[in-house]
Amino acid sequence: MSELRLVIFDVDGTLVDSQDLIQQAMVFAYDQIGVPAPARDLTLSYVGMSLDLIFQHLSPDLSDAQHAALSQGYRDAYFHMRQQQGSALTSPFFAGMRGVLDGLHAQDTTILAVATGKSKRGLDKLISGHGLEGYFQSLQVADFHPSKPHPAMIQACLTETGIAPARTVMIGDTSFDIDMGRAAGVHTIAVSWGYHDAVSLAADRVVTDPSDIMTTIDQLIGSDA
């Protein structure tokens, strides 16, 4: 049997399209403290960082108490909207990405993991909402690690699975994902349908269509065959 290999996915902007939900929650959070919300493009450019850091970058002139209120308001709005509408509507898969996950999950020597700026509660809800229980052998979230691009999340994936960096690839859509992968010494794939310009990220590979992901993984870390 082939040596095990590890494929780590970012979530928002890579697997699922949650930009409308994120923006609506942001607007609600700022409305709650009576401050105009930043422009949509600016808000979405920070997706992937830990939530507390996002507000420090978006609104550096606000107080710590206001930043805390924004974080709580965002969480409340996000979870309320998802509870009302469900993950399939608020965070749908990008076209073709569920098939990629299913194909990789079916491979005997491929191990899947997640490294996301989401909270544990948020990731758990998304996994249950999309029926992904049992797909990922390592789930790394913002609750327990420094924000991306710190390599702690990937290092935890490597430790939990026992797979070497040379047989590991990080797949994401932002500089936070790719810089995290580079810092951890693993291979990197940038996808073009997310929040940052994929070509500018200097990943090992850029993928513009989900149908090319599995072949690109094989090229970087060896095939499952």
Image (cartoon, rainbow, N blue to C red):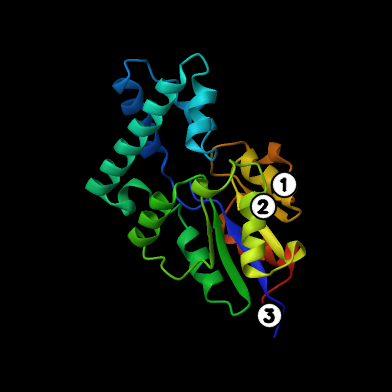
Residue at horizontal 33 percent and vertical 46 percent from the top: 90
* Quarter where residue 34 is shown: top left
Is residue 170 in view?
no
Q: Is residue 76 above or below residue 65?
A: below
Q: Secondary structure at mark 2?
A: strand
Residue 166 in picture, x, y percent from top left? 77, 63
Are discs 2 and 1 less than 8 Å apart at CB?
A: yes
* Quarter where residue 158 is shown: bottom right
Q: Which amino acid type is marked by label 1?
A: Ala
Residue 211 in picture, x, y percent from top left? 57, 60
Q: Which amino acid type is marked by label 3?
A: Ala
Q: CA distance from mark 2 to mark 1?
A: 6 Å
Q: Secondary structure at mark 1?
A: loop
Is residue 192 in view?
yes
| Disc number placed over residue 189 in the picture, else none | 2
Q: Earlier in the sequence, mark 3 or mark 2?
A: 2
| Disc number placed over residue 225 in the picture, else none | 3
Q: Earlier in the sequence, mark 2 or mark 1?
A: 2
In the rendered structure, the answer to whether residue 151 lies left or right of residue 58 reads: right
| Disc number placed over residue 194 in the picture, else none | none
In the image as oriented, which residue stretches furthest toward the front? 65
Q: Secondary structure at mark 3?
A: loop
Would you name the residue on which mark 1 appears? 203
Residue 106 in picture, x, y percent from top left? 53, 76
Residue at horizontal 52 percent and vertical 24 percent from the top: 56
Q: Quadrant of the C terminus?
A: bottom right
